Amino acid sequence: MEGCEQYAEWISARLDGPLSPEEERALNAHLAQCPDCQALEKDLKTLHEAFSEPIGPPAPPELLPGVMERVRQTAPGPRRVRRYQVRTLAGLAACLAICFGLYHSGWLRVPPGTAAPQSADSVEGLPDGVTTAPPDSGPAPEEMPESKQISPASASNSDLPAYIDSASVDGTVADDVEPPEATLSLRAAQFDGASLTVSGHEVDAVCTLSQLPQGAEEILQIDAALQAAETEQVYYLVSREQLDALMDLAQAQEDVEAELAVSESETGLCAVVLQN
Amino acid sequence: MTEQELVEKSKQGDQEAFEQLVRDNQNRVYALTARMAGDREEGADLAQEAFLRAWQGLPAFQGGSSFSTWIYRLAANVCIDYLRRRRRRWAVESGPSLDDSEEAWPEPADWKQDPQYRLEQAELGRAVSRGLDALPEYQRRILVLRELAGLSYQEIGQALDLDIGTVKSRIARARLALRKILLEDGNFSFAPPSKKTNEKKKGEHHGRL
């Protein structure tokens, strides 16, 4: 086998896909006169095929019930992404009604953070600054085979700890299974099953507004507006605090419609997208 | 019910259908995640995460590949994310020098203590399984990504930050190392041409792999 390294590499590579015609020719010529490489090829082929046998260890018995328990808590579809429409929200009575409704829809029973232990865990113990690298996504081969645009059809009902689901004019809360019909679309936002991005920025949450609410200029720099390349929608990158403040304003103004999508990432970055 | 029927039902929210899909794929997914993580408990958590992502990603799953193929790739991505996070943490704790995959992760737990592990393998699968566990971590991972997750060289390169040439040679070396381990392991026979040739190979491989 002295000097056979290159051939060994080709023998291995040929198990995974075709070689170039030159490599193929050279390897075959070598194999014809090297018994060691013939034996090697036979062995590696056996090994390669062995991987289609069950390769242990078998799954522990608690895996299946564990998965199904979490499945029962989660409707199919992207996690913790839902949309809602704010018309108005007036006074304490409405707030109380919402809190009551939230409790009954189950959100307030799960503190934020426990719903996504893997994210919290990944950040734990890192000094400040490191958390800016998103733990669960990154540029990564995080390719779900199909990434999809968020549309009303793909929004799901799942837990959303920090935000209000839906509120209507009379202050009653939809303790419902079906989310209210959305009037806005999150076209500028992309959701790939784990992370939300707006024009390439990974964000924790995207709020789409029919227009900026009055007073928005006190929360964000209006001239810091950016434009999404594909949809040409105007958007702002904001902190969670800014997003919360904008949502408060939007809720208080009847002529502003808002839709919210939240991912499980914790980049600290959020986006506000204007409907165009 | 075929896999495709189970997928269709699951897409419509049928949890029993999804449960069957999990049952059918859990062993291989777990074999993959446990080996990538090098830890049984982490492996179980990662497998669970992979299945949950599958459940959530089902509406977007077009059926261009089989569900099995899809879930293995999902599981591989869950593991790669996990290893990245772990490596980042490790790098923060130990300084910037440990960026090479060959040293950044600890050796795995010893599977062999588990009686179930010993019982449930076909002979060949068991031998390969043992051999995998005896490989150094970086060789085990690259082989698992190729053979269990079915990733292409290019995808493996992206996952591990390696160029394709390096991926190709590392996979070849991992296979040679696995073969060497199995040849030395008396329980497994490749039916080599002769014992003599076999001995000779061992000597030559030594130190190079």
Image: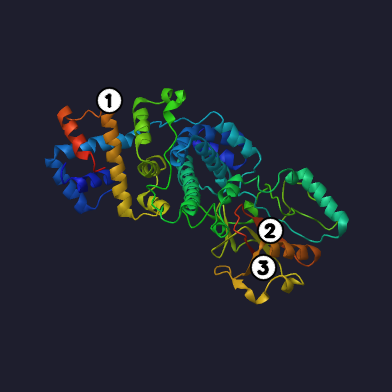
Q: Amino acid at mark 2?
A: Leu
**Where does the image place residue A188, in percent across and percent down from the top left?**
60, 64
Q: Amino acid at mark 3?
A: Gln
Residue underneath mark 3:
A275
Q: Quadrant of the C terminus of chain A?
A: bottom right
Name the residue at the front extreme. B94
Q: Amino acid at mark 1?
A: Gly
- Which secondary structure lies at badge 1? loop
Q: Is residue A223 above or below residue A187?
A: below
- Which secondary structure lies at badge 3? loop
- In terms of image quadrants, where is residue B52? top right
- In terms of image quadrants, where is residue A274? bottom right
| Label 2 with label 1: CB-CB less than 8 Å | no
> Given the image, what chain letter belongs to the residue carrying mark 3?
A
Residue B186 image label = 1
B194 or A49, which is in the foreground?
B194
User: Mark 3 to mark 2: distance in Å?
Assistant: 13 Å
> Given the image, what chain letter belongs to the residue carrying mark 2?
A
